[in-house]
Amino acid sequence: MIVTTLKPLLAKNRSWALQRRERNPHYFEKYLHQQKPHSLWIGCSDSRVPAEVLTGSHPGELFVHRNIANMVVPDDDNLMSVMQYAIFYLGVQRIVLCGHYGCGGVQAALGLPASPLATENSALARRIAALRRSLQQGLVEYHASDAGEEGTRLNRLVEANVLAQYAQLVASEPVRQAWQAGQALDVFGCVYDLQSGHLKELIQQSAEEFTP
């Protein structure tokens, strides 16, 4: 019988907190009574894509929402409430939608690898089905193309997913309300390369480009 314990995580937490205080005794006081993040990050739940780590951000700088395949679904109250709070209460001036190469959600939408969890009547199956619907055009192009290596084709499908979710994002009610009110808000679509550790911007739109 394997017994798990939280002690390793607690030890790392204590070490991290000590290092921060040694560098700056007031490190944790800055955002003790309020938070003022500059950006909302909407990313994938993949453990290899931690928003704060890959952007070099400190506590208080990013307001983060993550889900499988960085999906933007209009009737997802979880995501929509996060967006409303970030935009209208925290006043973020930037939204970053970030996908990543090697995304398991995108591969599941393609049927790679085949998973019983993604085919039975479950919450995961419903999410993958929704992902397939939003990625329909990208899937058509993937199957129609026989050019390039499989990895390259999968990367293009990941980028297609970012663009598909981005389209949902800029059409969402919170973003449109902010832009109609003249609120400064830039929206970016990016992809993260697991191999290089680099972010790549794919698309961007600001309030000035908004047409009601």
Image (cartoon, grey):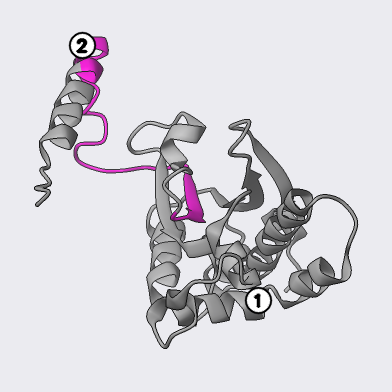
The picture quadrant where one finds residue 194 is top right
Of 47 and 120, nearer the camera is 120
Q: Residues within 10 Å of mark 1 (few under 14, many from 20)?
A: many
Residue type, label 1 = Ser
Taking the image as shown, residue 203 lies to the left or right of residue 35, namely: right
Point out residue 86 in the picture as x, y percentages from the top left corner: 42, 57
Magenta segment includes 23: yes
Q: Nearer the viewer, residue 68 or 55?
A: 68
Provide the residue designation for mark 1: 134
Q: Gap in Å between the C-alphas at discs 2 and 1?
A: 48 Å
Q: In the rendered view, tell whether residue 146 sits above or below residue 20.
A: below
Report whether residue 181 is seen. Answer: no
> Is 205 on the left or on the right of 197, as rendered?
right
Q: Residue at 12% across / 49% down in the picture?
A: 2
Residue 25 image position (x, y, % from top left): 19, 15
Vertical placement of residue 171 versus 57, above or below: below
In this orientation, does residue 174 appear? Answer: yes
In which image quadrant can residue 175 be found? bottom right
Q: Which residue is mark 2?
A: 22
Residue at the spot x=69%, y=73% of the render? 135
Q: Residue at x 72, y 52 (%)?
A: 155
Q: Earlier in the sequence, mark 2 or mark 1?
A: 2
Amino acid type, mark 2:
Glu
Mark 2, secondary structure of its residue: helix
Q: Which residues are magenta?
A: 19-45
Q: Residue at x 45, y 71 (%)?
A: 80
Point out the image quarter for the C terminus.
bottom right
